[in-house]
Amino acid sequence: MDYRKGSIGRLFVARIDHSEDLLAELSGLASKENIRSAFFVMLGAVGSARLVIGPKEKSVPPEIVWSTFNDAREIIGVGNIFWENGAPKIHLHGAAGNSKGIVMGCIRKEAEAFMVVEVFIVEVDIQAERVFDEKIGFSPVRFPG
Amino acid sequence: MDYRKGSIGRLFVARIDHSEDLLAELSGLASKENIRSAFFVMLGAVGSARLVIGPKEKSVPPEIVWSTFNDAREIIGVGNIFWENGAPKIHLHGAAGNSKGIVMGCIRKEAEAFMVVEVFIVEVDIQAERVFDEKIGFSPVRFPG
Amino acid sequence: MDYRKGSIGRLFVARIDHSEDLLAELSGLASKENIRSAFFVMLGAVGSARLVIGPKEKSVPPEIVWSTFNDAREIIGVGNIFWENGAPKIHLHGAAGNSKGIVMGCIRKEAEAFMVVEVFIVEVDIQAERVFDEKIGFSPVRFPG
């Protein structure tokens, strides 16, 4: 484990509207407001998304399994905002369901708000960034200094 | 997307006890303490609930699908508190499961704590309210001014 | 319902690394940093865990049902840190899934990070502790004074 402690920065309440892309909106907000380190929670509905629903086997680096949905679903999400190579990177895990079932995982592409998604973002004054690690095929959060 | 930024207000740690109604308790707390804008997370168990598990089809306004459970389930929830027409409105999404399966959605009625539910509420100094929108059959968060 | 209000303390951003035990790491952090009252959210992946997925029947005290997984899964978690008998107690509810399905409940043992788990901890200045209640077989949060 590695960790840092800090104190609170700004808070943001955001409403993402129908057909807007969750990841693009959050990334754009992070750029515009220069949000460098933050966690968020979200609730609402999504019309579609591409997500990674886990590794195929328990091996490192993992062979990841993609899933896609294109029907409207209720969602809860937990995520964070850190930067990688000079741009914000949204890390978002969510569970999304409707009467046909539930899917959960790492929401990475084409996540479209259905009706509305409400997001609560908590900025922290902790310096951190994502650095790509070739061995694991992923960019963990690193704390410089 | 619309959003506002602000800073932190009060924090609340609440324990909702066996057989108490989650929504009534949170709504009562919001009234008593005049919590106008807040997000919360919760964990615990629920004995029953009526929830919307998504739209039937991907159309606006959606025809919503209700689900009910009356067996005790573990829960995680994410929600917020804003006011509509002079009264607090609790928006709560949760995933609730036991050995028979998992259901998730927007918990709207008769959500009864089983044993205990623990809630962490973060108040923000951002002015926002819910305003009913006839076209979508829902009350999105609006930011006045 | 019982509750207390307070204000914010320190924030922690933690990265739990591959094969580390989530509960031991969080408990160790709470001891080292003397975190007495806090809530947290987490996202990442877990390689294994033992969790309680709910009561068998809707009766108090409940007969709890255990579940175990040992394949890597995506996770979202919500939890808190309070102390019981002079030691930190981690209460963690999570939903964990992969292409084989989703399980959710109270994660209590052998929860091993797969690749990485990211945790955001919010400390509050509210005095609270867990006190064991024989009648329900659980230790609810109590607010002294």
Image: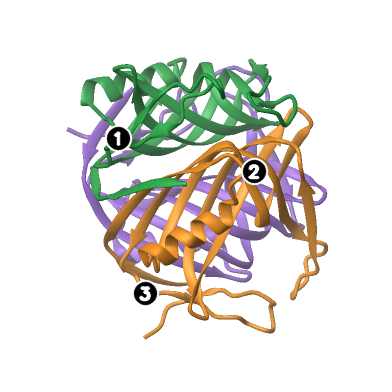
Chain colours: A green, B purple, C orange
Quadrant assignment, res C98: top right
Q: Which residue is mark 2?
A: C95
How many other residues sit within 10 Å of disc 2, few (<14), some (14-19) or many (≥20)?
many
What is the chain letter for disc 3? C
Q: Are marks 2 and 3 in contact (CB under 8 Å)?
A: no
Q: Position of residue A62 (x, y in %)?
A: 66, 24
Q: Position of residue C122 (x, y in %)?
A: 37, 54
What is the chain letter for disc 2? C
What is the chain letter for disc 1? A
Q: Which residue is mark 1?
A: A144
Q: Residue drawn 65% across and 55% down? A: C107
C67, A50: nearer the viewer: C67
Q: Quadrant where the N terminus of chain B lies?
A: top left
Judging from the image, what secondary structure is the residue with disc 3 in? loop
Inspect the image, locate mark 1, and give the three-letter code of the amino acid beneath it. Pro
Which dot marks residue B140? none
Q: Residue drawn 53% across and 28% down? A: A45
Q: Is residue A29 visible?
A: yes
How many other residues sit within 10 Å of disc 1, few (<14), some (14-19) or many (≥20)?
few
Inspect the image, locate mark 2, and give the three-letter code of the amino acid beneath it. Ala
Frontmost of labels 2 and 1 is 1
Which dot marks residue C127? 3
Judging from the image, what secondary structure is the residue with disc 1 in? loop
Quadrant assignment, res A48: top right
